Image: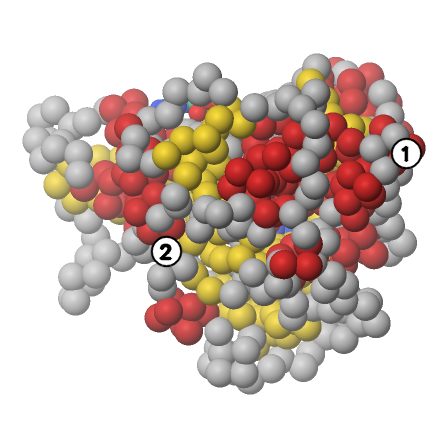
């Protein structure tokens, strides 16, 4: 274990507490959040989040309509100040996904920006508008002493191989420790200014990208939506760090040859960080060549928050996710899932298992899934396969389940898409696979047996169907029509036999 001291103080945001205590002090005037032309200092954030925290303090659990806006950041901060668990909702979720998340997590309130139209799946919930009013007199922040480090802070829904998404219950302790471990690895301080355009309903964009800067007393500028022009603008106007998924860095790499301003801006950054999926070495190299800067990768999961990273003071090595973060125990195991692989030879493959204060507590309402995710002695089975270099650098080489697809940095279970496809009247049988895609990493491919071979459903029809039920990023990009799915003697679909030719 690393010597990093664990800060289990219930105060997640010391800079906010300080701004509240001394509204005229310099800390209160420091910038905290910026979304487009709207921004809040720490003093203003305290002033607008504290009354909201007081209003949600009695709620058992709240949902947040997590648009990429200032309102979402304020609502989540308010929930954390109040010690009330928040469920961030993807505002593009379709009806069946949203229905599942709401009935599974049973929030008593949904917080949404004023004027937002909410879908009917949320109609039964009481609504509270997020009103950003910095002129209101600040109420005192709820006493942080009331929040146990084990209190659930966020419930983040994440896909599995089959069935609907599961809610990972993330305690305050995990958020604090993962952010502090990243601060150690990245020399991340209150002087850093982060820029990103990630969605705010997942760990990457919300915990690392919003709560991270706030825990350090630094600031974040959110682009609203990812665009290379926004990245270039912010990095040339004082931002020091960039977070993104590989698709974003791929788009940067594609743009660089024709955009010297982007190259110049990236060259100025203190740290360029990629995560959520593997960044191909080709994109690493193209960015390094055009900017002289190397992107570093970190590896995490919704259930574990961050496990490893290339350190700011370490050697950036393309194709690796660096070394275990302070406080994180990491081992590779053989196929039996319990025998540790001792080799540091860059060759011996094992499943990554992790243990430490960065882990989630459970899948909400799913004791069996929770039990299955851990070994008897408390190691979490990530399902990611890796090797370790002699100096401890971890290289991810694949994953155990072929039924998990990473597309655009989103984890997507083949099973939930297959179930959605089977609900389409034009589909008799369906199987879903992922295939390599230069932009998305993997793209979703649907193999269907049409109910009527004379008029099979089109790719657009099936994409719309899946987007409406689940979410647009889960839509198939390619559809193949077959007479029958290849099955083994047991009737199980043989996905490996599903290839184009
Ligand atoms: C297209 N669209 C549709 C349809 N077709 N909408 C409805 N129905 C359809 N049939 C819309 C999309 O909603 C989107 O709208 C636009 O068309 C383009 O869609 P698409 O091509 O899918 O996406 P993109 O805009 O090209 O997105 C690429 C992206 C995105 C920006 C890289 O994939 C992304 O934000 N990824 C981030 C994933 C992430 O944060 N993962 C973290 C989880 P519009 O243009 O309005 O949006 S992993 C994690 O947290 C762990 C802990 C970790 O390690 O980080
Ligand atoms: P999620 O469940 O959406 O949190 O996704 C977690 C998964 O993303 C991990 O289990 C890995 O498969 C993958 N992942 C995250 N970061 C990286 C990375 N830097 N390189 C490769 N895979 C990654």
Q: Quadrant of residue 452?
A: top left
The span from disc 1 to disc 2 (Cα, nearest Å) is: 51 Å
Q: Nearer the viewer, residue 94 or 213?
A: 213
Determine the residue positioned at 51% across, 41% down: 56
Determine the residue positioned at 62% across, 80% down: 341
Of the two numbered discs 1 and 2 in the rendering, the one whose residue sits closer to the viewer? 1
Circle 1 sits on which residue? 25
On screen, 134 above or below 446?
above
Q: Quadrant of residue 393?
A: bottom right
Ligand 2 within 8 angstroms of badge 2 C-beta: no
231 to the left or right of 332: right
332 to the left or right of 414: right
On screen, 147 above or below 154?
below
The answer to whether the residue labelled 1 contacts the one labelled 2, judged by CB atoms less than 8 Å apart, is no
On screen, 184 above or below 351?
above
Query: Looking at the rendering, in which quadrant would you find the C terminus?
Result: top left
Residue 497 position in % (x across, y down)? 30, 53
Q: Nearer the viewer, residue 405 or 70?
A: 70
Q: Upstream in the sequence, badge 1 or badge 2?
A: 1
Residue 453 position in % (x across, y down)? 10, 31
SS for tag 1? loop
Circle 2 sits on which residue? 161
Q: Nearer the viewer, residue 128 or 489?
A: 128
Determine the residue positioned at 49% across, 83% down: 376
């Amino acid at each position: 274990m690393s010597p990093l001291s664990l800060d289990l103080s219930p105060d997640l945001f010391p800079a906010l507490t300080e701004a509240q205590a001394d509204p005229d002090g310099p800390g209160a005037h420091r910038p905290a959040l910026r979304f487009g032309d709207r921004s809040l200092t720490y003093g203003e954030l305290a002033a607008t989040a504290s009354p909201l925290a007081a209003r949600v303090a009695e709620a058992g659990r709240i949902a947040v309509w997590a648009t990429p806006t200032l309102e979402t950041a304020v609502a989540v901060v308010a929930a954390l100040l109040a010690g009330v668990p928040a469920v961030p909702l993807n505002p593009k979720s379709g009806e069946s996904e949203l229905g599942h998340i709401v009935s599974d997590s049973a929030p008593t309130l949904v917080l949404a920006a004023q004027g937002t139209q909410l879908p009917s799946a949320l109609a039964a919930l009481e609504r509270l508008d997020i009103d950003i009013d910095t002129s209101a007199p600040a109420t005192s922040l709820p006493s942080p002493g009331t929040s146990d480090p084990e209190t659930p802070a966020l419930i983040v829904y994440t896909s599995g191989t089959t069935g609907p998404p599961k809610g990972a219950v993330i305690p305050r302790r995990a958020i604090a420790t993962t952010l502090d471990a990243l601060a150690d690895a990245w020399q991340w301080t209150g002087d850093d200014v982060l820029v990103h355009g990630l969605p705010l309903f997942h760990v990457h964009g919300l915990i690392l990208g919003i709560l991270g800067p706030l825990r350090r007393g630094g600031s974040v500028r959110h682009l609203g939506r990812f665009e290379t022009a926004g990245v270039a603008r912010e990095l040339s106007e004082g931002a020091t760090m960039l977070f993104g998924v590989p698709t974003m860095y791929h788009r940067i790499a594609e743009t660089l040859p024709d955009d010297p301003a982007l190259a110049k801006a990236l060259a100025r950054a203190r740290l360029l960080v990629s995560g959520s999926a593997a960044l191909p070495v080709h994109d690493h190299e193209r960015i390094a060549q055009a900017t002289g800067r190397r992107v570093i990768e970190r590896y995490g999961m919704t259930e574990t928050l961050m496990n490893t990273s290339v350190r700011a003071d370490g050697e950036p090595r393309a194709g690796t996710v660096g070394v275990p973060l302070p406080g994180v125990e990491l081992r590779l195991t053989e196929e039996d899932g319990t025998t540790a692989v001792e080799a540091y030879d860059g060759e011996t493959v094992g499943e990554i298992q992790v243990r430490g204060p960065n882990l989630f507590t459970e899948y909400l309402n799913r004791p069996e899934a929770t039990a299955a995710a851990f070994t008897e002695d408390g190691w979490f089975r990530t399902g990611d396969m890796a090797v370790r270099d002699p100096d401890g650098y971890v290289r991810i080489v694949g994953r155990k389940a072929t039924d998990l697809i990473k597309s655009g940095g989103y984890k997507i279970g083949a099973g939930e898409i297959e179930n959605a496809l089977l609900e389409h009247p034009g589909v008799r049988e369906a199987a879903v696979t992922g295939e390599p895609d230069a932009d998305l990493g993997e793209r979703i491919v649907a193999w269907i047996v049409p109910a009527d071979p004379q008029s099979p459903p089109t790719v657009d029809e099936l994409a719309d169907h899946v987007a409406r039920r689940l979410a647009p990023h889960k839509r198939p990009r390619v559809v193949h029509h077959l007479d029958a799915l290849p099955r083994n003697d047991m009737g199980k679909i043989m996905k490996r036999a599903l290839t184009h030719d």
